[in-house]
Image (cartoon, rainbow, N blue to C red):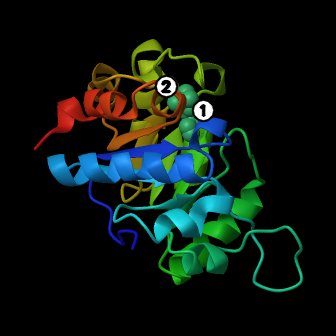
Amino acid sequence: MAATKIEYPLILINFKAYAEASGKKGLQLAKVAEKLSKEYGVTIAVAPQLTDLMFIAQQVDIPVFSQHVDDVSPGSHTGHVTLEAVKDAGAIGTMVNHSERRVRADQIDVVVKRARQLNLVTVVCTNTPEVTAAMAALGPDMVAIEPPELIGTGIPVSKAKPEVVTSSVDLVKKINPNVKVLCGAGITTGDDVAAALRLGTVGVLLASGVVKAKDWEKAILDLIRPILK
Ligand SMILES: O=C[C@H](O)COP(=O)(O)O
């Protein structure tokens, strides 16, 4: 049964649509994350592929997020993903507006408000400090600043564009200090995570650095090194 509470710092691993983390392989990766999370007392959450959401949420005791959700209520909406379905699947919450799955600001607003009513945690992805500020005004639990040009490059935002992260953190503090800030794009090593935390974030959102690693356990162990309790 997936965990129902988030503690920070947070390492959120997005499985995207990578073949390496699809179906049973996705479950194996989530199990590795769960094992290391328990062993080292670090919060590691996963965002599996939507088709695997319930399958994985039922079998791991770490927070599980949906990668995306639509702004529709249950009903006549073929091919859409509702917040209710994500909750039924056992997810703690959802990401929304990932740069690979953008949605309109008015739709994000609906998702954030409805998610709050359903006690689901929201992570709104953003691309610039200005957009981060605008999204923080909607009151999600977290925003995740990710310059799209660094995604999947292995060049960490926390080192390559620290000013983007610090400006986002500063703006969010002014606009809605309750909103927590993650950063992502190119995060691969523990040093990248340490840099992200030094810049004022509460954690990272990452994908390829773990999903595409030859040895998942080694990759995650390196990532959590700076936050071991
Ligand atoms: O959701 C994750 C982000 O898009 C970062 O992806 P990445 O870690 O492969 O650069």
Figure check: 6 above or below 21: below
Where residue 58 sits in the image (x, y, percent)? 46, 72
Q: Which residue is mark 2?
A: 164
Figure check: 191 above or below 40: above
The answer to whether residue 174 is visible is no
Residue placed farthest to the bottom in the image? 75
Q: Say what amino acid the circle numbered 1 marks.
A: Thr
Badge 1 residue CB within 8 Å of ligand 1:
no
How packed mark 2 is, by other alpha carbons closer than 10 Å (few <14, some 14-19, many 20 or more), is: many
Q: Please indicate whether residue 185 sits to the left or right of residue 103 in the image.
A: left
Q: Which residue is mark 1?
A: 128
Mark 1 or mark 2: which comes first in sequence? 1
Labelled pair 1, 2 in contact (Cβ < 8 Å):
yes
Residue placed farthest to the left in the image? 229
Given residues 167 and 25, the one toward you in this image is 25
Q: Say what amino acid the circle numbered 2 marks.
A: Val
> Residue at the location (35% across, 61% down)?
62
Displayed quadrant of residue 138: bottom right
Given residues 195 and 77, the one toward you in this image is 77
> Residue at the location (30% across, 36% down)?
200
> Residue at the location (47% across, 25% down)?
213
Given residues 164 and 52, the one toward you in this image is 52
Cα distance between the residues tagged 1 and 2: 7 Å
Task: Give residue 5's mark.
Answer: none
Q: Please indicate whether residue 32 sits to the left or right of residue 23 in the image.
A: left
Where residue 86 sits in the image (x, y, percent)? 61, 72
Ligand 1 quarter of the rendering: top right
Q: Please indicate whether residue 222 sits to the left or right of residue 96 in the image.
A: left
Query: Disc 1 on helix, strand or loop?
Result: loop
